[in-house]
Image (cartoon, helix red, strand yellow):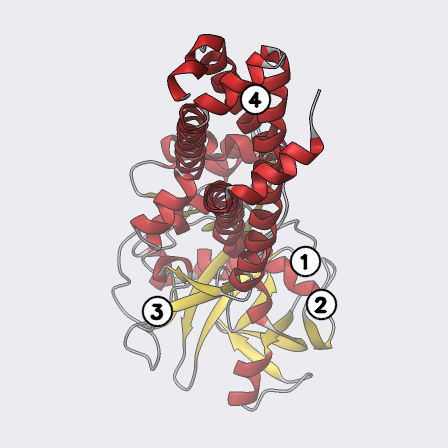
Amino acid sequence: MINGKYLISELRGRKRRSAVNIGMVALVTTVLLCITLLAGALEQAFQAPLNDIGANITVQKSGDVPEQMAGPVLPCSVAPISNQQRLSIADLPGIQSVSEAVLFWDFSDDMFQIVIGMRPDDKAGPSLLRTAVNKGRMFTKDDDAAALADGVWAEQNGMQIGNSIRIGGQAFTLIGLVDSSQISHIGTANVYIPLQKAQDIAAAASGVQTIHTFTRQDSNLLFIQADRDKTEKIAEQIRGIIGKKAAVSTPASFTKLLGSLFDLTRRFSGIISTLVFLFALLLIVRNSSAAITERTKEIGTMKAVGWTGSDIRAQLLAENSFYILLGSGLGLLAGAVTAWGLSHISIAIPIPWDMAPNPHFLPGGGEQLFKEVQLQMNITPKLLFLCCAMPPVLALATAWKAGRSISQLQTSEVLRYE
C-alpha cells in the first residue's frame, strides 16, 4: 500500500534528485517529440514540389542540344518519350494515372516563348492550372486554336485576352491568363495550348526532327500518380522502360538536393529517437539503482517494521511514476513550444533546371529556382504512440530494477547502519 505522506516528504526531502529525474525525462520527451515532428515535416516538404502538380513521379528523358535556336525546338532535358513507352509505364502495378504534356521552346524573329501542350482535364501536371485562371477561362477539349498565357509574361509582353499569338507558325487566340506559380516551377510555361496542337507542331518542326524522332502521339513530360509505398520501386521500373537517359523524379530526388543533413534527419529519425529513448532508460534505471543503494538503511528499517517487498516496490514505483509523469508533461509542453517555433521556418527546395528548362543565354535563364515550403508540424499516430508508451515503459523499467535490488536486500543489513 502506498503511503502518501511518506511519498510527499521523500519528494520534498530529496529536491536535487527529484529535479534531476524530472528534468531528464522532460528533456528526453522534448527531444523525441521534436525529432519525430521534424522528420514528418521534412517528409511533407520534400513532397511539396510534386504535390503542387498532383503527382508523385515525373518522367523526362535527356537528349541532344538543338542545332539552331530557330522555330520550335526541344530543350535537351525533354527528349521525346514514345507513346509505346507511355503505355508500358501506365500498365505497371501501382500506377494510378499517367498525364502527359509536350514542352518546347519557340523562337521567332521578334519573340521567344516556352510552350506546353496539355489536356485540360488531366489529373496531374500543368492542367491543374484550371484552378489558377485569373482572367478569362480554361480551354476545353473542344477548343482547337485556343491558348492560355502566364499572367506575368502576358503583362511583360503587352498581351491581353483576345489577342492572337503565333506558335510554330500557327495562330492561337488568347482566352485566359493563369498564375503559373500555383504549381511551383515544374511543368510551367509562358503559353499553354491543347496537347494535340503541341504534338502536331513538334512533329512538323524541322528543328525537332533533325535531332529527334517525334510523332504526333509522342510526348516529353509525364506526370504520374502512383501508390506512395511503391514510388521508388516504380521509378526504377520506369528507368528500365525509358533507358539510361531517363530522368525520373520522386520526393526522394528533392531530399538529395538539400544535402546530407536533411537526408539523415529524415531517414534516421527513428533510429535517433530509439537511441535517445534507450539512453533515458539506462539513466533512469541507473538512478533507480543508486537510489536503492542510497536508501539501504531506510529500506532495511521499513522491512524491519513490517513492510513487505511488494509494499516497498509500490512505494518506489509511485515516486518514480511521479517523476516520469511530471517530466513527460513538462517535456510535452516544451516540445509543443519548440514545434510551434519550428513551424514558422520555411525551407527553400531547389528545382533542377532540367525540370524547368529555360535558355541559359536569356536573362534569368541560369537562375536557380526554388520552392519555398513552410514546415508543417502535424501530430501523427507514431507520435501519439511514443508519447503514450514512453511513461509506462520507463515506470516499469524502474519498478523492475527496484524490485531486483530490494529482493537482494536482507533485513539484517540495517544493523550495519546502527
From mark 4 to mark 1, how far is it between C-alphas? 60 Å
Q: Nearer the viewer, residue 346 or 239?
A: 346
Task: Report if the CB atoms under discs 2 and 1 are less than 8 Å apart.
Answer: yes
Residue at the spot x=55%, y=52% of the render? 335
Residue at the spot x=62%, y=24% of the render? 315
Question: Label 3 is placed on what type of residue?
Answer: Gln
Q: Which circle, 2 or 3, is nearer the viewer?
A: 3
In terms of sequence position, does the residue under pointer 3 or pointer 4 come before the other?
3
Question: Label 2 is placed on what type of residue?
Answer: Met
**Circle 4 residue:** 396
> Does residue 74 appear left or right of residue 379 in this picture?
left
Q: Which circle, 4 or 1, is nearer the viewer?
A: 4
Residue 126 in the image: state x and y as whole percent: 58, 59
Residue at the spot x=63%, y=34% of the render? 7
- Quadrant where the image shows the N terminus: top right
Q: Residue furthest front?
A: 418
From mark 3 to mark 4, how far is it between C-alphas? 54 Å
**Circle 2 residue:** 138
Question: Label 4 is placed on what type of residue?
Answer: Leu
From mark 2 to mark 4, how far is it between C-alphas? 63 Å
Indicate the secondary structure of the residue bearing disc 4: helix
Residue 82 makes an appearance in the image: yes
Question: Label 1 is placed on what type of residue?
Answer: Pro
Indicate the secondary structure of the residue bearing disc 1: loop
Q: Quadrant of residue 381?
A: top right
Residue 368 in the image: state x and y as whole percent: 35, 69
Indicate the secondary structure of the residue bearing disc 2: loop
- Quadrant where the image shows the C terminus: top left
Q: Which circle, 3 or 4, is nearer the viewer?
A: 4
Residue 89 in the image: state x and y as whole percent: 50, 33
**Circle 1 residue:** 120
